[in-house]
Image: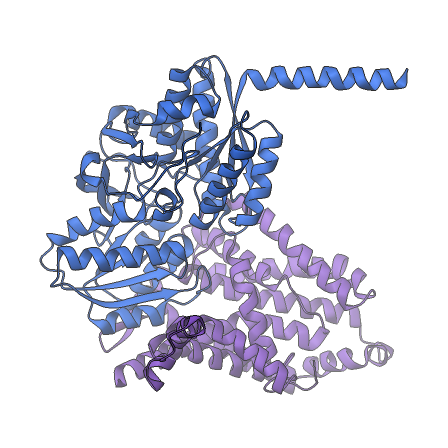
Amino acid sequence: MKHLFATTALAVSLVAGHAAAEDTLKIGYVDPLSGGAASVGQIGLNHLKFIADEANAKGGINREKVEVIGYDNQVNAQTSLVQVQKAIDEGVRIIVQGNGSSVGVAIEDFVAKYNRRNPDKHIVYLNYGAIDPVLTNEKCSYWHVSFDANVNVKMAALTNFIKDQSDIKKIYLIDQDYSFGHAVADAAVKMLKEKRADIEVVGNEFHPLVKITDFAPYVAKIKASGADAVITGNWGQDFSLLLKAAGQAGLKVKWFTYYAGAAGGPTAIKQADLAGQVYQVNEGINNLGYPEADKTIKAYIDRYKDAPVVFPRIFNTAGLLFKAVEEAKSSDPADFIPKLEGMEYKTFSSGGDGFIRKEDHQLFQPLFISSFGPLKDGESFDEENTGWGWTKIGEVAAKDTVVPTTCEMKRPG
Amino acid sequence: MLEIVFVSTINGVLFGMLLFLMASGLTVIFSMMGVLNLAHASFYMLGAFFGFEISRHIGFWPALILAPILVALIGMVVERFGLRRVHRYGHVAELLFTFGLTFVIQQVVEMVWGRLPVNYVVPPSLNFSAFTIFSTTYPAFKVFELLTAVAIFVVLLLIIRRTRIGLIVQAALTHPDMVGMLGHNVDRIFMLVFGVGVALAAVAGVIAGPALVTQSNMAGLLGPILFVVVVVGGLGSLSGAFAASLLIGLVQTFAVAFDISLADLFGPLDLDNALGDYLNDIWNVTIAQVAPILPYLLLVLVLIVRPRGLMGMRDT
């Protein structure tokens, strides 16, 4: 009797679990939710929750309710794989991750292997921010889609801008000592040589990741080198401390950055009082005057007042995913990935044209070069309550950001 | 060359004094109570956030006084109701207790102030450049930081060596029973010492907060280097911690300034095999690249060659 009862309970729970899985679209968000990088990871999760709530308010995607589940990976590749497995066990088939290229490579490998071994139950890895070029070149995979422009694409846009700045003669490179930092430095050296052979690279410095408290010695070196511009891929506290040290020492150079707009960056630039000296290249800023984006940004900032940082790349990721799921009328990755290939899309920040290249699953989108300073007339969004905001300086259309790929993709079947 | 040496020296001294500011409280607690307080950096963080909150409402200078007092009160409560109870179970229990405390404090800070950096700025009265050398400006705030560190060092040294309180405190460490017999309340002395120790951490927090980044992970990022200072200086030696802070500040700053690798000194390696490739990587690493790990190398060397540290009184 007892045995029969247990079996029945199991059967009932299995049926219930199955039914629940059918009418929810589960997104597993695998990023740091504790430890040093948690502030950035939490912001990403806030974005997805906001997007899911908006979609559900409109009746869901294909009438399926969108559910976002956070998995804490502590920016550690090994932990990430455990968490991805856990997500799969809980019925998740869409993995979203963006912080750390080393983590990205590990997940890409894992997902490809998993799909090979489970030919009737596929999962997909949507990468909104790991931008080491290796992910869409040597290691590219059918089950991975990259939604942020990679290091080389962004550097091409930056160097095109620098090319026309005739007052820049000497450039200093300072980056974090890991795969991403080296990719930035290598791309800078190569592209500067092609585009402006007269520019001298007066320093190519690497420092350990999030270990430095005092950047004064590095700033002294930049100063001694006579550089008039610095290119850096630094983010987080490595960016904040570097700029504050520069402000204190009175270093007057132009800063060309990848992540000045990430959490904490704007506060540091304001404190260092570097108005108009810091540039960033990314997929979009708040003050582009595109009404649809403005509406969403406002709603988002109202909801998350204590972390008012907007990542357009996550809106793009979710927008493309939902579009593909609706077109395929299925939330099975095997069904909707073919729809993503070659898909055209109006990007979040400006409504500009973007598309996903079939060969390597890289999204190409308009890129913006912007500078940071006190808000000008007609600009409504400041960053981190500093009263300063981003102003567009230049824009590169998606078709002009296309770089070749070496990807030889293995397709299923 | 002269410019680099000069600027590096100043940067090194400034950084060294910041380190001492942070490590002094840790040394005080260890030398007088024999407790290695792993949560020290967390109290430093509390000081920074209290300083931020108070200076937002009534200004930086009141914050410099009030924040450490608040943190000292919290510290004394922790000592009275937590540390004192686990004390009788020995050092491991103490370590685990303070280790756990770091997580509690971090969670509380995240609940109150969030995970993003807060906008803690240098007070207007110190926001000007004190002097300019070789076209590099040095903010008055950093000079203030240096002066505070030196003042704390001198005052602490005088109290410990020259006053009755210092005498009783030192006696209580080695002969608690005898001091108790003589009519002193040893428990209360320990509670006060712990309070003063964490108050010093809070002073460092209030001052370093605007210069560095005030956010909920600042404790974890700073923790390890403080232990290097205390161990290299000699566990429990205030003068040792002072010397070690300066040494570490200077070593790290000078190392960053020099892009010299083994290849520059001895010429390139001529080995055309797998081993050669491997060695080449090491051969071409510059001093600047390894600068941030030099303090830890120093820690290992000191523990091997001179376990008591530069000026320590006993072997660790």
Q: Identify the colour of chain B in the image.
A: purple
In the depicted view, which residue is nearer to us: B271 or A88? Answer: B271
Q: Position of residue A39 (x, y in %)?
A: 48, 45
On the image, which quarter does residue A197 sit in? bottom left
Task: Please say whether residue B47 is visible from this viewpoint.
Answer: no
Task: Please say whether residue A392 is visible from this viewpoint.
Answer: yes
Q: Is residue B180 above or below residue A75?
A: below
Q: Position of residue A391 (x, y in %)?
A: 21, 41
Who's the residue at 29% across and 72% down the image?
A221
Which chain is in blue here?
Answer: A
Of the 4 image quadrants, the one containing the N terminus of chain A is: top right
In the depicted view, which residue is nearer to us: A28 or B137? Answer: A28
Q: Is residue A126 above or below residue B294?
A: above
Who's the residue at 28% across and 38% down the image?
A285
Q: Position of residue B173 (x, y in %)?
A: 76, 78
Q: Is residue A326 above or below residue A406?
A: above
In the depicted view, which residue is nearer to us: B139 or B241? Answer: B241
How many labels, in total?
A: 0
Who's the residue at 46% across and 75% down the image?
B17
Left or right? Give the position of A256 relative to A177.
Answer: left
Who's the residue at 55% across and 62% down the image?
B44
On the image, which quarter does residue B181 sit in? bottom right
Of the 4 image quadrants, the one containing the C terminus of chain A is: top left
